[in-house]
Image (spheres, rainbow, N blue to C red):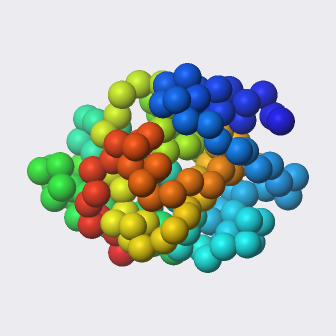
Amino acid sequence: MHPTAQQFSDAVRDTHDFDITVREFPEGTKTAQDAADAVGCDIAQIVKSIVMRVGDETVVVLTSGNHRVDETALASEFGVDAGDVRSANPSEVKTTTGWSIGGVPPTCHETPVPVLADPVFETFEEVWAAAGTPKAVFRLTPSELRSIADPRMADVFE
């Protein structure tokens, strides 16, 4: 297992007393479609961890693989102007979450950040999320996602 994926697996176990099985794919799981194809699930079952800047705050938005973040709705959720919402740059992502773009997991971030999740996840028996690298994912149930990520369910997606 890649050392970064192992680091994430260890962090989840140590922080949440939750053991995961990391699946790695040499061809990569950089996009939601790549991940869905690799694990054999619907693209909607892929948990994308989108790191956003909302005003002066960094937020992790867990969106379904076939959804996009609605920046206007996200701004409204946090009470800021829509112009104050943008995607975090790679440096901000790494500094805040401890993970690189393409491998940001839904939990075990370097600094405490608000986490929002797509309510559509509740319609699936299982979902798949990044496990620390662009080539690693893990399976979990929506209940387990809520338990380890402690997200606020919010409809900020299009």
Give residue 91's position: percent from left, percent from top.
53, 32
Left-right relation of 94 to 155: right
Foreground of the two, 138 or 61:
138
- Residue sitting farthest toward the left: 79
Task: Examine the rendered structure and indicate whether residue 118 appears above or below residue 53.
Answer: below
Q: Quadrant of residue 32?
A: bottom right
Instruction: State the residue at coordinates (76%, 50%).
Output: 23
Instruction: State the residue at coordinates (65%, 33%).
Output: 9
Foreground of the two, 44 or 12:
12
Instruction: State the residue at coordinates (51%, 68%).
Output: 125
Give residue 4's position: percent from left, percent from top.
72, 30
Give residue 131's position: percent from left, percent from top.
65, 43
Residue 61 in sight? no
Give residue 77's position: percent from left, percent from top.
18, 55
Foreground of the two, 126 or 72:
126
Residue 78 in sight? yes
Q: Quadrant of the N terminus?
A: top right
Instruction: State the residue at coordinates (12%, 50%).
Output: 79
Q: Quadrant of residue 153?
A: bottom left
